Image: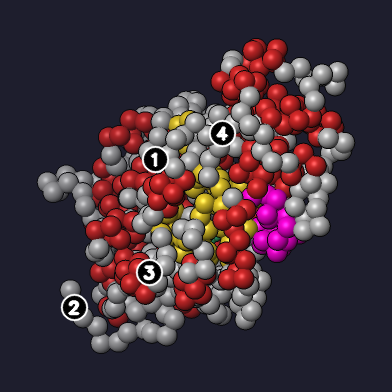
Amino acid sequence: MATTETTVRGGVCPIKSMYVREAPSKVVLAMPSTPVPSPAAALTEGPRAADSASGNGPADGDDDVDDETATTATPSDPQPQRLRGMNKGAERAHVFVAGSGDKPVFEGERNFFFGPTLSRVKIALKLDKQQQQAGGGQQPKRGRDGAPGSHHAAPPPTTTAAADALSSAPIADVTSAVPLTSSSSAAPGELAALWVVPSRDDEPPAVRRQRLFSNKLILAPLTTVGNLPYRRICKSFGADVTLSEMSLAYNLNHTQKSEWSLLRRHESEDIFGIQIATKNEWEAATVAKLLKASEFSYDYVDVNCGCPVELICQQGCGCGLWEKKGRMKGVMENLTRYQDQPVTVKCRIGRDEADPQLHKHIGEYESWGASAVTIHGRSRKQRYTKLANWEYINDCANRTQLPVIGNGDIMSYEDVAERRAQFPALSSHMIARGALIKPWVFTEIKERRTWDISSHERLEMLKKFAAFGLSHWGADAKGVHTTRRFMCEWLSFLCRYVPVGLLERLPQRINDRPPYYVGRDDLETLMASDSVEDWIRSTELLLGPCGPDFKFTPKHKSNSYASNLSGLTVSGAEVASAAAIDLVGEVEG
Ligand SMILES: Cc1cc2nc3c(=O)[nH]c(=O)nc-3n(C[C@H](O)[C@H](O)[C@H](O)COP(=O)(O)O)c2cc1C
């Protein structure tokens, strides 16, 4: 590969000049006209035509690529004019057709919210209400520092036979053991005791912390994009720990099925945390009781204290909770008290980066019941602007005995190696956008290498996502639609990956933006497109034609390319923001 004479620098990803173009070139991918009959078969047999398009097709030459149409753009044939959709005019042929009417098969999944689980949760909810009424009101009184008073502040009662019965007995036994009507003769203290069942897990806390949070690569919680099929992909690339998308305690406490389904876990997720956003200690107490009653499988509960989205904060969640110390303490205490698994905090460095406050409080978190703290090294005000402050993260880690997980801007094995060397106080590392842009970053870190992944391998990854999506959301029209929508969401991040072979200098940094470029084959060029039309086109390679009614508006504006930028702000904040607005809308509705 020839080296370059010129390089684009300065917040702009340096790409070898032979690939740089003023705008993406139009790519026409020739596809077979005969569709594969069933999505399942198609996804297991492999995309022959897609292989061809990626330049990795069968060596015998018996492929479907039409030479004239397949290579309309090459590095030596620049097309200066920017076309919004690189595939405008491309024939709408496709490889896979979905729509066989298949329902989700939920392969390898658990944590379902129906049947006995739902019944148990409903009973737990009634008991909780009854307990609150018996305690004299809907919400427990709060102490001066905002800590819960009345029954929630009482020291945890000891195990009772009733508690054991509740957690293990079939539903009929539970209802008979605990009267649910207001004529219940159970005293408030006895009812409270029902919820306090010590963990059956004999593992000492220190050993458990070590097992869960020491030297781990953690996939961050990611609203909308961090769905189960995507997490399976990250697991296959070597993520050690995964987290659910953020779920709102309010919605869980209102038995909203869609919220509970965010807590679904795949069997490959061997260490799995669920993330909860909650505004106060009594909401936290209820959700903890429901989680326990659900018997859902998870390894820890993470409390979202870092979401900067205004609407979430106004509700008292995210950064809004973190800024109310007393409430946060009550939340931690009640989550620890009323369910069995360890509780962790995810927060930012403070409200304002000029005056970060976390170092003043982090030492207290252990006494509130926390088992670990994740620090995203930016302030609430900063959202995603500027780089994360890892010196400060390390400083905070030195002020607590808890494992501290560092988070911010990791996108390569070099990023992790540098941080491991410079900030030894940190136990583990969490990756968000880096894992959206290149999920194989986990492999790179573990194998200490840079992976010049081919467009064919990337397509294989998308193919797996399609298969996982159809299993999770269903292979009927609705499931295909949902899979397509979430694939588009993810593609809006994936397109920001710049292939290693095109880079003038390694590694690609998270805040770098490339100039427009052409890839080494048409599929690579297609995958670099920041056009919604091309993302849809890519989904058609795997899921069949989307039909005229499919509309996709990304939850964020994809500022993928240097020429689009007025600054180096990152679109992720807008994604989280848009997603959060949706969620708050549900809360208010
Ligand atoms: C699309 C998107 C969704 C996110 N959703 C959540 C979330 O649900 N809960 C949370 O605590 N953080 C969320 N975050 C923040 C990330 O977990 C992470 O803290 C942040 O992006 C910084 O890490 P990074 O620099 O590796 O991206 C989200 C970020 C993005 C980009």
Name the disc covering residue 198, or none: 4
User: In the rendered image, is residue 104 in sight?
Assistant: yes
Q: Are marks 3 and 2 in contact (CB under 8 Å)?
A: no
In the rendered image, residue 361, in percent from the top left (x then y), is placed at: 62, 66
Residue nearer the viewer, 363 or 211: 363
The chief SS type of the magenta part is: helix
Which one is earlier in the sequence, the residue at label 1 or at label 2?
2
Question: Looking at the image, is mark 4 or mark 3 nearer the viewer?
Answer: 4
* Residue 580 appears left or right of 376: right
Q: CA distance from mark 1 to mark 4?
A: 22 Å
Instruction: Tell me whether the residue at label 3 lies in contact with that at label 1, contact meaning CB atoms closer than 8 angstroms.
Output: no
Q: Amino acid at mark 3?
A: Pro
Question: Which quadrant of the view contains residue 158?
Answer: top right
Does the magenta segment cover residue 328? yes
CB under 8 Å between discs 4 and 2: no
What's the residue type where badge 1 is placed?
Asp
Instruction: Check disc 3 and report the residue beneath it.
Output: 424
Residue receiving disc 2: 2
Some atom of ligand 1 lies within 8 Å of the CB belonging to the residue at label 3: no
- Residue at the (66%, 38%) spot, across then down: 156
Looking at the picture, tell me which residue is in the foreground, 171 or 583.
171
The foreground one among 419 and 235 is 419
